[in-house]
Amino acid sequence: KAGVTQTPRYLIKTRGQQVTLSCSPISGHRSVSWYQQTPGQGLQFLFEYFSETQRNKGNFPGRFSGRQFSNSRSEMNVSTLELGDSALYLCASSSGDREGQPQHFGDGTRLSIL
Amino acid sequence: GESVGLHLPTLSVQEGDNSIINCAYSNSASDYFIWYKQESGKGPQFIIDIRSNMDKRQGQRVTVLLNKTVKHLSLQIAATQPGDSAVYFCAEKKQAGTALIFGKGTTLSVSS
């Protein structure tokens, strides 16, 4: 079974631009969660989508948004990029239909803001 | 606050030794716990999980212990190998529909 796929792997943007990151979950998984990982703050939860609906949201500004498509693929968008948005953005998928199911992560998109 | 932490940021062991990585959690309502391994340039890789109705769970060369009385979680790796060198994160989940909360990680270095 193919794992979680994130594209692109690396991205360089400048302040004020916007960016869209993509995540394809493991086949059959309906839940997709996004995390931001930085050396200072560690892994922080952004949001979770399940069956095209946002089910949970972390404490990030409205510049961070996401969506999920009917095939469970998900995108996250960051608008008006700031230097502090430089991070590794990780996507994780799980079946999402019952508790106690582990999330499986992709290798992330490394976003650098100049 | 509600966070999952780890006791030591780094741990160095010799190849063949057993490793123990510790984690303290603060929310007694958490009912699901996971250990992840993250190698350089990769995303976290699922190692093992445990539910709050269990005290111990074993996998291949790994054991997770959960002590709910003192809110402590540990990961034991038997016969540690150089390939086990990575950052290890524990994570907790409170209830249905909530997010995983991650600790800050312990870097395990294995020397041969």
Image (cartoon, coloured by chain):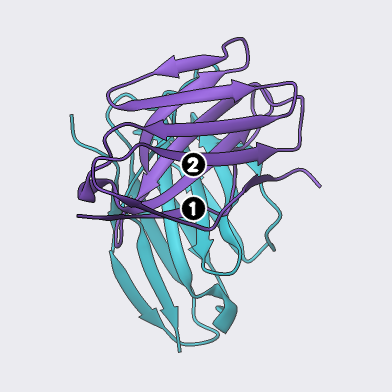
Chain colours: A cyan, B purple
Q: How many marks?
A: 2
- Vertical side of A71 occupied by B52: above or below: above
Amino acid found under the numbered disc labelled 1: Thr
For marks 2 and 1, the one nearer the N-term is 2
**Residue A82 shows in the view:** no
Please report the residue visible at 75 percent of the width from the left and 37 percent of the height from the top. Answer: B26
Q: Position of residue A23 (x, y in %)?
A: 35, 49
Please report the residue visible at 57 percent of the width from the left and 14 percent of the height from the top. Answer: B55
- Vertical side of B13 occupied by A103: above or below: above
Q: Quadrant of the N terminus of chain A?
A: top left
Q: Quadrant of the C terminus of chain A?
A: bottom left
Q: Residues within 10 Å of mark 1 (few under 14, many from 20)?
A: many
**Residue B19 shows in the view:** yes
Disc 1 is placed on an element classified as strand
Front residue of B38 and A80: B38
Q: Position of residue B17 (x, y in %)?
A: 31, 40
Front residue of B22 and A80: B22
Q: Position of residue B53 (x, y in %)?
A: 62, 10
Q: Chain of mark 1?
A: B
| Quarter of image, res A25 | top left
Please report the residue visible at 41 percent of the width from the left and 82 percent of the height from the top. Answer: A13
Cβ–Cβ under 8 Å for marks 2 and 1: yes
Side of B108 where B22 appears, left or right: right
Q: CA distance from mark 2 to mark 1?
A: 7 Å
Amino acid found under the numbered disc labelled 2: Ile
- Reading the image, the residue beneath label 2 is B21
| Quarter of image, res B107 | bottom left
Picture disc at residue B20: none
Please report the residue visible at 19 percent of the width from the left and 55 percent of the height from the top. Answer: B112
- Vertical side of A78 occupied by A81: above or below: below
- Reading the image, the residue beneath label 1 is B106
